Every structure is written in C-alpha cells, then in structure tokens.
Amino acid sequence: MTRIAFIGLGNMGGGMAANLAKAGHDVRAFDLSADALDRAKAAGCLPAVSAAEAADGAEAIVTMLPAGTHVEAVYADLFAANVAPSTLLLDCSTIDVATAKRVAAAAHAKGLTAVDAPVSGGIGAANAGTLTFMVGGSAEAFERARVILAAMGKAVIHAGANGTGQAAKIANNMLLGATMVATCEAFLLAEKLGLDPQTFYDISSVASGQSWSMTSYCPVPGVGPDTPADHDYRGGFATALMLKDLKLAAAAAGDTGADTPMGAKAAELYQRFADDGQSGLDFSAIIRMLRG
Ligand code: NAD
C-alpha cells in the first residue's frame, strides 16, 4: 500500500482516484469542487482541505487537472509546502510539452522525482481502470510510476525523457481529431452516393479505411458498437477537450517547424464547431456540422 495524494477529481480523476483506493492504496484527495470531494470520499478516499494537506506524508502525488496553468499553480503550492524529497510526482493531465518539461525541471531542482503521464481512453476507461498511460521521465522514475499507474490502466508505456509522454499524447490526439473528421466525411459521402451507413461500416471496418474512429467510436448512431453517437453525443470526449489538444498540437508544430496541414484543418473545423455553441458535445458530433 502506498500513500498517494490525488489532486483533480473531475470526470477523469474521480474514477482514477477511486481505482487507486480500490487497489488498496491510502488515497488523500483534493479538488476545488466540494461535490467532487464528496464523490471521492464515497469511493474510499480521504478528503483534504488543500493540495498541501493531501500531499503531507504522501509517497506519490497524482495530478489530473484541466491544463498547464493549473498544473503549474498546484505544483507551486506543493513546492511551497516542502513535500518530502523522495516524493514522486505524476502529472496525468494533458498539457503542453514546454510546461511539462518546466514543472519537471522545477521538481527535480527541489529533489523530487517527476513524470508526465497523460492518458488515452476517456471517462469510461478511467472508471473501468483500463486507461493507456504514456510516460515521460527517467527509467528509474518510470519504474516507480508504473506500479501506481498499473492500478488505473491496462497499458503503461515509457515514451522517453520528461515531456515525451505529452508529445505522444498530443501527436496521438492530432491523429484522432483528423481521422474522426475524415471518418464523418466518408460516411456522409457514402450516404450521398446511396450507400446504407451500416453497409458502408461493414465494408470499411474491414477494408483499408478502418480506424479507431470507425470501429470503436463510430460517429453514426445505430452503427457499430455503443458510442456517444447512440446517446445524442452526450458524455464521451468533449469537443472543447479535442480542440484544446489540437491547439496544443498546432503550437507544438509551430515550435518545432513540423508541417501538419491535416491537424491544422481539424483544429479549424473543431474551432468552428465549438464557436457554434457545441463545445460540450462529444467530438464525434462534428458529423452534424459536416452534414450542414
Ligand atoms: P474536469 O474539468 O472534469 O476535471 C478537472 C478537475 O480539476 C475539476 O474537478 C476541477 O475542480 C479540478 N481543479 C482545477 N483546478 C484545481 C486546483 N487548483 N486544485 C484542485 N483541483 C483543481 O476535466 P477531466 O475531463 O477530468 O480532464 C482532466 C485532464 O485529463 C485534462 O487535461 C484533459 O485534457 C485530460 N483528458 C481528458 C479525457 C476525457 O475524456 N475527459 C481523456 C483523456 C485526457
């Protein structure tokens, strides 16, 4: 059993903290939201009144926060609270590579160990403990992190040095955003050409157009497995979060000089969809905008 502080108990963090408690860890939880804290308490975590109180005496501190600014603010509180030098910091939020590297360097300067460990899988996987973690940090830090992350996921992969977990996440989600738009377009074109969506799915899901967006997250209601499309595009992975990740990818492409025209087009389309007031809907709902 490890004493773990968990900070950020939202859609993702709530289920992740619950799975750590279920695995027998001593979880001290903190969130700015009282409702989120109540849910964590019901799931077996001990609520704290601040990040610093949750971190007091912890061997590991997991953060699952909206963006880089939140991670920097919480880390500043932790550094001011003088957490023990051997403490392992695991940031599972999706944030920009530069901030991930900066907070890790600041943690190392304090004698702490830090990894970036963003996730793929969404709320269902967070609740079920079947996330995929992509981890940036030293080999020693990865070995320590793996034991904790394994209680929340089905795959824990070492990407390389600090920041590479975020690099993998951002590149992966740029691919996801672009393939979702392309999958929606393909269904709409097939429909205009007179094909039944189920027939097109049956063919394309075993042909070269196959992708995760098609077979695991089909954007057309009533076709393929149960997805947010079958629930009026509620739940799932919000358009606002996909847009955030596409913007992180665009910024990273700008910083590195990578040419990513498909990623840029996906960002433009998701921006238009969000501007139309649809940022709370699952990202596969973009098929509605493309339908016109
Ligand atoms: P969320 O908004 O539901 O949860 C974030 C939580 O952080 C909230 O409960 C909020 O109150 C809390 N918080 C904010 N600032 C805080 C602070 N200073 N101290 C303590 N708590 C604070 O977001 P989410 O959907 O759980 O996503 C979290 C992260 O995971 C994001 O970076 C997101 O991009 C990433 N992610 C989300 C999904 C998804 O499907 N939702 C999938 C993969 C990755």
Image (cartoon, rainbow, N blue to C red):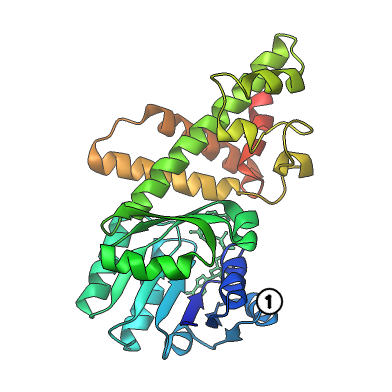
Vertical order, 59 against 223 (above or below): below
Residue 109 as seen in the image, left or right of residue 192: left
Look at 62% across and 30% down and name the residue there.
Answer: 214
**Residue 138 in sight in this render:** no
In the visual, does 290 lie left or right of 262?
Answer: right
* Image quadrant in which you'd find residue 21: bottom right
174 or 274: nearer the eye?
174
Q: Which residue is mark 1?
A: 39
15 over 119 or under it: above or below: below
**77 on left or right of 282:** left
Q: Position of residue 227 (x, y in %)?
A: 71, 42
89 relative to 196 in the view: left or right: left
Q: Residues within 10 Å of mark 1 (few under 14, many from 20)?
A: some
Is residue 292 or residue 224 the one in the foreground? 224
Residue farthest left in this picture: 109
Question: Which quarter of the rendered picture does the C terminus lie within?
Answer: top right
Q: Given the image, on which type of amino acid does mark 1 rest?
A: Arg
Task: Report the residue at 54% width, 87% height from top.
Answer: 48
Q: Is residue 17 visible?
A: yes
Q: Secondary structure at mark 1?
A: helix
Residue 111 horizontal/vertical position (percent): 23, 80
